[in-house]
Amino acid sequence: MSIKDWPSQERPRERLLQQGAKALSDAELLAIFLRTGTRNLSAVDLARQLLTDFGNLSQLLQASKTEFCAAEGLGEAKFTQLQAVMEMARRIQADALSQGQTITKAADAADFLIAELGHRPAEVFGALFLDTKHHILAFEELFHGTIDHTSVHPRELIRRVMHHNAARIILAHNHPSGDTTPSQADITLTKSLKNALEMLDVRLLDHLVIGKKSFCSLAEHGFL
């Protein structure tokens, strides 16, 4: 049965308009994005099949172009549309974060950092630069690594701190595995960078380990 033949209160688009996007399941949201199904599957049925094949919505969104386009009902057009939507969402978060927002705790920056780093297939190390009142000055990706290692150079971090005239800083890096448990290397590096920054009278507020949907604050766990 086509979605057009469903009762109006059960159609994803109508439900979104009446109840809001949060009321919809992952499959219903994906069906709206897909717009159409296949000869044998409605858009919702296709969405459910894709979620089963890829594991979940997050893994579908993070799939490579080859993996994405190989799936039934998908292709380059939908891949480019999805990438554009995801990038717009990241830019909206970045704009909201940069417009004078004050960071008082790890969670204030976590959503942005998860969106920015959580999907990366290899480690990325970045920093939020803040002024004395914890207003955001900038976010920068500083170092890029392999699947499980990033070489962090204190001299380059200090150079960027001075460039932004930052007084406070929050460090962040992702774990592509999704496990946000800080390694001993993460803890050792954090303490080393904290000491280097203190020489410039710059306070390290936190170091966040970013997963696909979660984060770990080293400050909250007593590692600073």
Image (cartoon, rainbow, N blue to C red):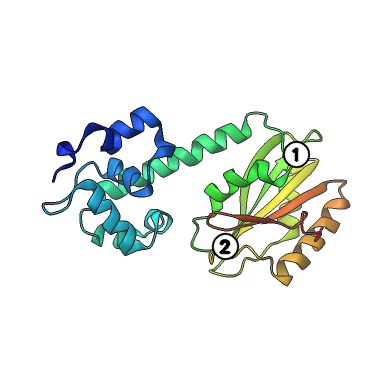
Q: Residue at x 56, y 50 (%)?
A: 114
> Seen from this angle, which residue lies furthest left?
39
| In the depicted structure, whether residue 113 falls above or below residue 72 | above
Amino acid marked by disc 1: Thr
Marked residue nearer the N-terminal end (2 or 1) = 1
The residue pinned by badge 2 equals: 123
Q: Residue at x 75, y 46 (%)?
A: 169
Count of all numbered marks drawn on residues in the image: 2
- Comparing 162 with 92, the one in front is 92
Q: Residue at x 50, y 34 (%)?
A: 92
The residue pinned by badge 1 equals: 104
- Comparing 202 with 39, the one in front is 39
- Comparing 138 with 87, the one in front is 87
Amino acid marked by disc 2: Glu
| Other residues around mark 1 within 10 Å, as few (<14) / some (14–19) / many (≥20) | few
Q: Is residue 76 left or right of residue 114?
A: left
Screen quadrant of the C terminus: bottom right
Q: Secondary structure at mark 2?
A: loop
